[in-house]
Amino acid sequence: MDGVGFEWWLDNRLTPAFEKEFPGKKMILVMDNASYHHQMNTAYYPEKKTPDNATKALNVHVLRVAGCTSIKVPRVDKATGEAALMNFEVGGEPASVAAYRAAGPTPPAADLTGIYARFPSGPSSDELAAATTGWLKANKPEVLDSKVEKAFREKEWLIVWTPPYCPKFQPIELVWGAGKQRASGMYFPNRNLIDTRLHLRMGFYGGSDYRGTTWAAVNIAGCWAKAEKEMNKWIAVDKDHVDGGLTGTITDLQGAGNWTSTGVGCLDITDMECAPDPEPVDATGLQVGPGDEEDPDVDNESSAEEEGEGP
């Protein structure tokens, strides 16, 4: 399965079948974190583009379309060692930038200012990507929706994402496991793909094999109950490992708020409670140290490399 196949199945199998079987009802779809479930929608970014791999020109364009008028970028002042927030106005798009974004490969003008200026006068690609993601999450989360999230948002349906690397919590994994275990029991030497497909179908939907064994359809409700039982077992011991941890059951969960805050040892601090932002400083007021000069031939600069931290 890949993203294209999943989207085809979603649009041509699951959605029409659900709407025919349950007209007027809202779907709640439980899915795991397979990568093809998370293909980003293309309403704002082109196919396979995200804030992390987009050019500065594209990220600024998306911010503008999403309604952002200015963006704050954190940076450490090398002269003082203190962190500061730099404020960049999104503003209009210079003609050379628009041409580069639309067609390329000619780079935009080298004398651009503000948000389009080269590092350190402007944000680096890494800085802008992080700031863009943060702003979109806070103000326009639908931009970052996967294709299935976008489709479900428009229908006012819901998605429940199951935790990664926890197959016992995944009802579908248990269904697959039961069907494949049965198919393995039907094996005979030199079994071909056609027979394997037939055995898998019997494993899932029931039937009689060549030995005369009759299989009932996989008990879907039983697989769901088993997954629920495993989740509740995990919840029951969570408080033994995490102060003020989870209690209750998966259908009556208590303490989930403790899992939405980042621990002090985590490097990702985007969801921590922080002091109010300091006043933004003028980007031109930061002192430039040796080695910070911009390479005019490099468009997609990286702040890590410019500070000597890259490979």
Image (cartoon, rainbow, N blue to C red):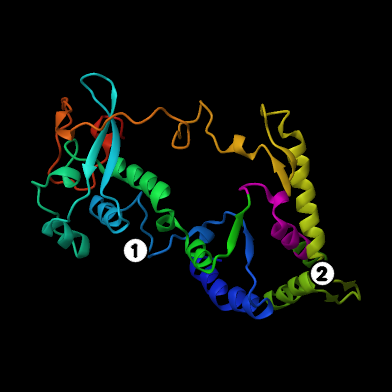
Picture layout, residue 105 above or below residue 14: above
Gap between marks 2 and 1, in whole Å?
A: 46 Å
Residue drawn at (12%, 59%) of the image: 95
Q: Position of residue 45 (x, y in %)?
A: 34, 60
- Compare marks 2 and 1 and give the one earlier in the sequence: 1
Front one among 165 and 280: 280
What secondary structure is the stretch in magenta mostly built from?
A: helix
In this picture, residue 286 sits left or right of residue 195: left
Q: Amino acid at mark 2?
A: Met
Front one among 303 and 183: 303
- Residue 173 visible? The answer is yes
Picture layout, residue 227 above or below residue 232: below
Q: Which residues are magenta?
A: 163-179
Q: Amino acid at mark 1?
A: Pro
Q: Is residue 184 magenta?
A: no
Residue matched to label 1: 46
Front one among 255 and 53: 255
